[in-house]
Structure formats: structure tokens, C-alpha cells
Amino acid sequence: MIIIENIKTLHNHLFTIKKDSKTIGFVPTMGALHKGHISLILKAKVENNISVCSIFVNPTQFNNVSDLEKYPKTLEADIIKLKKADCDFLFLPSVEEMYPKNEVNLYYNLGLIETTLEGKYRPGHFQGVCIIVDKLLAIVMPTTLYLGRKDYQQCMVINKMMQDKPYNINLCICDTVREEDGLAMSSRNMRLDEIERQRALRIIESLQMIECNLKIGSLELLKKSSVIFLEQNNYKVDYVEIADAETLELQTTWDGKRKLVALVAAYLNDVRLIDNIIL
Ligand code: PAF
């Protein structure tokens, strides 16, 4: 695996590769890699000639300084995992490289998907995600971008950002990878102690409760029951919502036909966990 810290060097490597009509699969990450990330790398490898992973803890997408400071950093272990997965390139830029002084950030017109759900609780988060993913795509110019469905809203936001740009890049959204007991893999899980790790299962259970009890008519009781269930288990709930799976418009009733997604975000002590399931 070739590790590159500098935009120009990566550009030069990838330019030669593209000149030979080789395809590039790209997986952007913030490090603290787990099996979910590695499954994206493996898919990128199977489907392309070249795989590129980036590790960059992007400051502009953290609306909370302490969340940024506490974000797990495990670079040595990450490199070992990527080498084992036989990833071809790791792009490891510095903050100065990605955010040169005096550069004016772009603004992305994302509509409802920017301000609902995660956007309501993490203002500015999705602008930060778009800024960095846009920059990374412009550098890597991959054939296909690989993202995990665990960040359901992020996938929609990035899809919208890409559609509004003259990129000719495919977006491959891959299923959430879960631990054997059902917990969605997340870098934030590393911050859970043993008791919290057990209690983290209440997140997927709150979604399964919705899945099992979904019926035509009002959805209000369904959502409320999951909120109460989480609160009884010492969670501080940001939201449990049911939304249109395509537009992310929040739903209060169901006609039995519309494709829905149930989404949750809640704090277990100071660790914020999110998950979703398509109903
Ligand atoms: O999902 C993430 O890890 C980040 O939001 C991403 C897509 C790498 C952008 O920083």
C-alpha cells in the first residue's frame, strides 16, 4: 500500500492510472477503521482496478469541539488493517493540506435533507461533509465512491451534492455491517465501556420495535414507544423518526405503500449513537 500525504503526489499517481483506463474505487473515512470500513475497501477492490482509502478527521463537520477532540484516532492499527485488506493507496492529508489559509468554503444547496434529523441536532454538519467529500472527489476523481448506509442521511446528502456537480462518479451505498449481536459498527463504539456496549443494543432494538409493530395508520405511538424504551434505558434521545426512504420527509401516518426508513440518534452517557433500518 502506498501512503501519500500530499494532494499533488496523489494526483500524479492517479493521473497515470486513469490514463491507462483503469477504474478507481474510493472509500473516504475519518479513521478508527472497523469491519464496516474494511468491507467497503474490499468491495472497492473487487469492483475496480485500484482502491483508494482516505483518512482525514474533518474539522468542519464537527459542530462540537469536544466531539472532535474525543474522536478516536488509531492510525497505526488502521494502516495494518488497510494493508491486510490489500488497499492500494492511503491518502492521509493534513488539515493545512485540505484547508489552505484564506480559502473560502463553498456553500451547498441541499434543501430539506440538510436541516432535518441529524441536520437539526448538528447544525452545519452536512455543509462540512459536503466541503470535504467534494474536495476529496476532485482530488481522487474515482470511478465509484463507496459509502455505508449506517449514515443514511449522509449518503443522501452526498448523492445530492454529487448530482449538482459535473462529476461523472458512481455512488455505491453498501449495507450497514453489524456486530454479531446486531450493533451497527461505528468508530464511536470504541468509546463505550463494557456496560455501555451491552446497553448499546437498545438502539437497534428500538428500531426493531418499530419494524415489528408497523401498521397502516398513525405512526405516533410507534415512535413514542421507542423513545420511552430508550429513555427507560438511560439514553438521552435526540430523535426516533420514521421518514420517507427516498425524500427523508418525516411521516406521521402510513398508507401501507410508501417506502419508509426508521432512524434513531441518542446519547449513551456522552457517546452519540445513530442507526437506521429500511422498513
Ligand atoms: O462518514 C464519515 O466518516 C465522514 O463523514 C466522511 C464521509 C469520511 C467525510 O469526512
Image: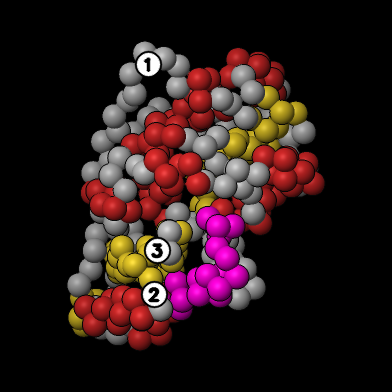
Q: Which residues are magenta?
A: 188-206
For disc 2, the marked residue is 234
The residue pinned by badge 3 equals 267
Picture disc at residue 189:
none
Q: Is residue 130 left or right of residue 15?
A: left
For label 1, being within 8 Å of ligand 1 is answered no
201 and 210: which is toward the camera? 201
Left or right: 24 in relation to 250: right
Q: Are marks 2 and 1 in contact (CB under 8 Å)?
A: no
Judged by its main secondary structure, the magenta piece is: helix
Question: Which amino acid type corresponds to the residue marked 3 in the rendered image?
Answer: Tyr
Closer to the camera: disc 1 or disc 3? Answer: 3
User: Where in the figure is residue 37, as x and y percent of width and height?
Assistant: 62, 50
3D distance between C-alphas at marks 1 and 3:
35 Å
Q: Mark 2: which secondary structure?
A: loop
- Residue shown at 24% from the left, 63% from the top: 250
Q: Position of residue 90 (x, y in %)?
A: 67, 33
Residue at the (57%, 65%) spot, across then down: 193
Q: Secondary structure at mark 1?
A: loop
Residue 109: image x %, image y %? Answer: 26, 36
Task: Name the residue type under label 2.
Answer: Asn
Q: Is residue 5 visible?
A: yes
Q: How is the image coloured?
A: secondary structure
Q: Quadrant of residue 241?
A: bottom left
Dot 2 and dot 3 residues touching (CB under 8 Å)? no
Look at label 1 and name its amino acid.
Glu
Is the C-beta of the residue carrying label 2 under 8 Å from the nearest atom of ligand 1?
A: no
Say which residue label 1 marks: 103
Q: Quadrant of the C terminus?
A: bottom left
